[in-house]
Image: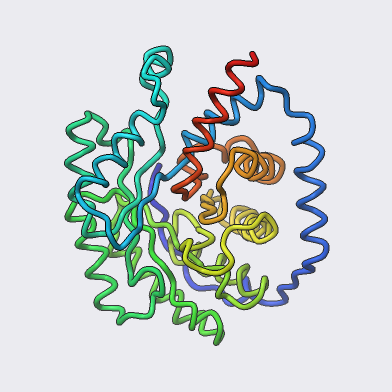
Amino acid sequence: MVANVEIPYDAKQLSNVRVNLACVVRSVDLLTSAVIKRVTDAEFREYTLQALKLTDLTTLAGDDTESNVARLCFRAAYPFSDLNVHAQMKGQVHTAAVCVYPSRVADAHRALKALGMLNRVQIASVATGFPSGSYPLETRLKEIRFAIEQGASEIDIVIDRSLVLTGKWQELYDEIVAMRKACGEKVHLKAILGIGECGTMVNVYKASMVAMMAGSDFIKTSTGKEAVNATLPVGLVMIRAIQKFYRFTGKKIGLKPAGGVRTVRDAIAWMIMIRETLGEEWLKPELFRFGASGLLDDIEKQFYAVSKRL
């Protein structure tokens, strides 16, 4: 996938934005509920494997060490404890990426290289003063460059929510453009909006649009550290922004819900909503990811359970 490139800031794309939350909630229900009820065991198994392949397996703890990052990478490469499953699937089942702090990127790089999984499992690093984003721009840009030097192939930046809350959209655009340039042409940039701290759904929509104009390859719901993280209604608002951006630029931008997606059924609801709005073509790692640490546990549990029933 070719990295996105910024387009000129266009304030018109942020004018006359209205979000009817009640309608958004109803739309989510209409898009997902009926379909989920009709999912067969065979379809459930396929959804389970698809969710696994779309997952950024994450550890963002204060006590992360080289050893637990190595364990994370092994599980990303071999997510099922029964290695016969991997043999049957010829090594094609693994997570999309691992996601770690910049200081742990080198550990992830060494571990994935030893497993022969570099470039098959991507290395994502949070950056830019995660999770608050409230640091000087200069240090945030240095953090991006450091993570890339250590081997990161994807950077999950976190935007400064104070710029959203005060409507400083041009300043937000300029900061993300600088981050895009720090990433260069080969490293993908995911912009974390921190939706639980954006104030309103209108702000979520506008922040999504600004991030895409500034060159983000993905827009991501949350850091996972806010009181409110990924919800289907906020996901639909972000999807509407992605659709509008695609209509006027022809560029496909990815979506990453993070925080709150803990079960396969949660993941299925998101995948159905993506399929019903953006289309099947978005259901691939280049355009859709789950940011999760606990989802993989339920994926393994449900995969074994449904396999026994088939």
At 56% from the left and 62% from the top, the residue drawn is: 229
Residue 5 as seen in the image, left or right of residue 22: left
**Residue at left offset 21%, top offset 49%:** 151
Residue for point 43% across, 61% down: 215
Q: Which residue: 41% across, 74% down?
A: 132
Of all residues shown, which one is farthest toward the bottom? 166
Is 88 rendered above or below residue 259? above
Quarter holding residue 171? bottom left
Pick the residue in front: 98 or 302. 302
Vertical comparison of 85 with 219: above or below: above
Is residue 283 positioned above or below 143 on the image? above
**How was this image coloured?**
rainbow
Left or right side of 159 for 106: left
Residue 60, quarter of picture: bottom left
Relative placement, left or right, of 5 versus 298 is left
Q: How many marks?
A: 0
State which quarter of the image contains the N terminus. top left
Figure quadrant of the C terminus? top right
Residue 203 image position (x, y, % from top left): 62, 74
User: What x and y, as percent, mark residue 37?
Assistant: 79, 34
Residue 270 at x, y percent in the picture: 64, 45
Rendering coords of residue 127 (x, y %): 32, 64
Residues 246 and 80: in front is 80
